[in-house]
Amino acid sequence: MRSTTPLRISAVLLFAMGTSALAGPADDLSRAAVGALPALQMGGAAVGEARDEGGNAVLVNVTFSSTGSTPIGVRIGRATITGAPAADGTLANARVLLEDVEGTGADGHGYKLARAEMQGAQGSLAAIFGSFATQAPLLQPANEGTATGFSAQSVAARDLVVTQPRQNRQQTVRYAEIALNGYQRGRVAELTVRSTQAAPSDGQPGPAASAASIRLTGLDTVAAVRTSGAAGVWMESGVVEGISIASPRPGAPPFAIARIAMGKVSLRPGAQSITALTESMQALGPAQDEASRRRQAGLAAEFIERFDMERFELAGVSGQSEEGRPFRMERFVFSGLSQGRLASVSVSGVSASSRDGHDTTIGQVTVEGIDASGLLAFGKEFAAGRVPPGQTMPPQAFPHATRILFENIDVKQTGSNQQLAKVGRFEVESGPRVGLMPSRLRGRLTGFEAPITNARQRAQLAPLGLTERLNLGAELEIEYVETARELRMRTFNVEVDDVGSLNLVMTVGGLDRAQIEALPGSAAVLGLSAKAGGITLTYTEDGGVANFISHLAGQTGMSEDDFKEQIKTQAGALVGQFIQDRAVAAQITEAFGEFLDDPTSLAVTLTPKGDIPLAALAVALRGSPFAAMPMFNIAVKANE
């Protein structure tokens, strides 16, 4: 009798081979993807059905979840892959179509995506799947492994709806279309988003917002989830257009921004990724106690310190205040952000209405050389618990700017358009600080105009010859000279058109750098050690004194010459009361009389007779300015 064993073995082999043949590419691709997901920090992967349809591999009901710090469960309703994969499931120039994709996370996070299509896909299908285990797929990577695990010539998605908690409310963000061109293992040549809309999910009034389009170029998505390595470029440039934020007041126009433009942005590595840091800041919410305030300060300091940005620009900003008053800003720009420092901030084309009935326009405001790195350092110290409660900020923590410029400020009365004040240019420059005090300070005001609008103002200024408007300019220059231990006011000059100018030059000595650095705690000690130096006050005539004399002479019914003689007599008597040295009193009276006869200039110089502490001078001045005169040698010169 013949044995049937070989026949049974042959039947088993044929069945196994047939089963393997029936499995096809879709099953192979399914097993490869499921097997590769755990290495990408994805767990619980399963495929409901894998089948081949006309040369396409179709995977139905793909489910898995991320296992990182922010778990996201993902379900892909249908995945269609066109293009034969390699034996290990690696894609080569494939088309991948994902439909009915859904992500669910903790604390109300989640999303739904109708469709995403990749052309020219290469690399791991598991990495493509895993890239959707994030709170905002295609916009935020899940982790470095999924982001770098594949490439694609293009990615197109539509109808992405993201739900996320914001300030104890659920918010829904809708993205109509998302496109990535030139995706190369985490790097994107161009990312565009059309029509973004955000609004509270509960349907109640809230901060609804929208953007017509977003375009980012040279984007490195991995930089947002990377925690190690050197600083790298996150984005070469970006543009957001057509931004609108609904007003909380019913019927009011929205807050609008025509365009946001960003230059190159670099990210510095840290203990946690920028994505994780952002999620931590969002989860923290408003500070309620000391611990949350410290946590908030630490996160904010780290977030700012990690970013370097070449340029950020807002254009076409408009809206209304809470009282319904309109405002507009043509442009806001900052540049050179790095490590808490800014090269410059500029605001131009500002117009606003205030509650007191004034319309203000500002041509431009520029601030340069801003250094807030000390404030960031203090924030980190505060977050670490090394700042006792109630302690004030040290001087080095206060931000500093090297230059501030205001140009073309105009204030008018609402409705009547009556001009109230105008400034052509106001500029302040400061040198390196010594404690809270800049070592050098220069200021200049030009083109200040103020119309004389009422009878009271005219009555006060008419004696000086001013009846229509007041035009003035001013200049200030102060410097601390450490080697001489002196603070020198080189000039403080105020000039009024058609009146004259007044210039003050003075010196304060005895100022040690260590005492200045210890301000404000050392104010009492500094007041005792600081010494009054020389003072020179100079008036230069431009018609004001002549007009004043003419006006007063006319009121008294005297001639101008007789009125001048009367003033000379009164001045001589006054000087004699406070100046004991008759020769000095005579010289002062003579110089004053010479000035009255031909008003050109008058300079008064005070030279300390010895060391005069500022504290003692302040005490003397409480009674009368003349009480301090015996402390100084006095010289008066006219018309020099």
Image: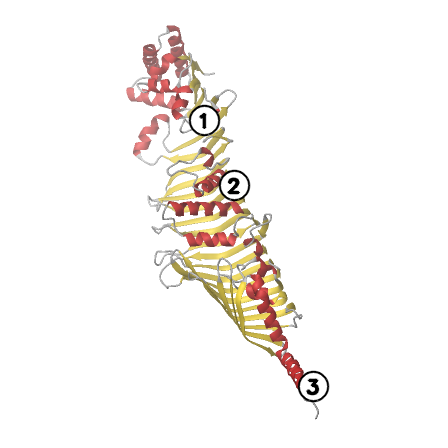
Name the residue carrying label 2.
Answer: 341
Name the residue carrying label 3.
Answer: 6
What residue is shown at x 50% (from left), y 43% (from top)? Answer: 346
The amino acid beneath tag 2 is: Arg
Q: Nearer the viewer, residue 222 or 601?
A: 222
Q: Position of residue 442 (x, y in %)?
A: 49, 30
| First in sequence: mark 3 vs mark 2 | 3
Residue placed furthest toward the bottom: 1
Q: Is residue 162 visible?
A: no
The amino acid beneath tag 3 is: Pro
Local SS, label 1? helix
Local SS, label 3? helix
Locate residue 253: give its quadrant: bottom left
Q: Position of residue 248 (x, y in %)?
A: 36, 56
Name the residue carrying label 1.
Answer: 516
Q: Nearer the viewer, residue 147 or 203?
A: 147
